[in-house]
Amino acid sequence: MTGGVHAGDIIEAKVDLVLANDNHPKQAVLSGPVASLKTIEQALAAAGLGFQPLKVAAAFHSPLVAPAADTFATHVRASAVAAPRLPVIADGSAQPYPATPDAIKAQLSAQLAEPV
């Protein structure tokens, strides 16, 4: 991103888009309906910012996938999970995953529809 403009500033008026991944001051991932992403692509270009569509199956890390989060959580809770032998950094918190299986499952379940 250039000129002090951040994608988050541009999407404020687009309530159906979310800043799903705030990776770096010069790189962010927007999530939302395809039509809205096409519209925001034009606004980003007008602001001198690049836009690269990602080939993904769904609008992950956004409210659009929240209905699937309950089903995902059910499957995660039924899965065998052990404490990691090495630190594993969670994308949502940028911190190591907790050590207990129940806490790991809760964190995994929550991250599906939450920004990272």
Image (tube, grey):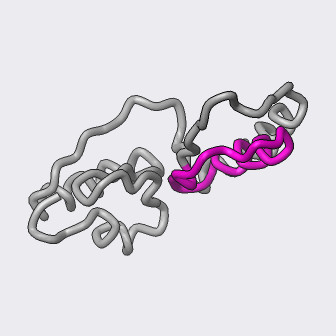
Q: Nearer the viewer, residue 2 or 39?
A: 2
Quarter where residue 73 is shown: top right
Name the quadrant of the N terminus.
Answer: bottom left
Residue found at x 37% / y 49%: 29
Q: Position of residue 43 (x, y in %)?
A: 21, 61
Q: Position of residue 46 (x, y in %)?
A: 11, 61
Q: Position of residue 114 (x, y in %)?
A: 60, 55
Residue furthest to the right: 78
Residue 89 as seen in the image, left or right of residue 84 = left
Q: Nearer the viewer, residue 39 or 22?
A: 22
Residue 63 as seen in the image, left or right of residue 30 = right
In the image, the segment drawn in magenta is 92-116
Q: Nearer the viewer, residue 91 or 84?
A: 84
Residue found at x 30% / y 48%: 38
Quarter where residue 78 is shown: top right
Q: Nearer the viewer, residue 80 or 112?
A: 80
The answer to whether residue 17 is magenta is no
Residue found at x 20% / y 55%: 42
For the image, the number of numbered tags is: 0
Residue found at x 76% / y 37%: 72
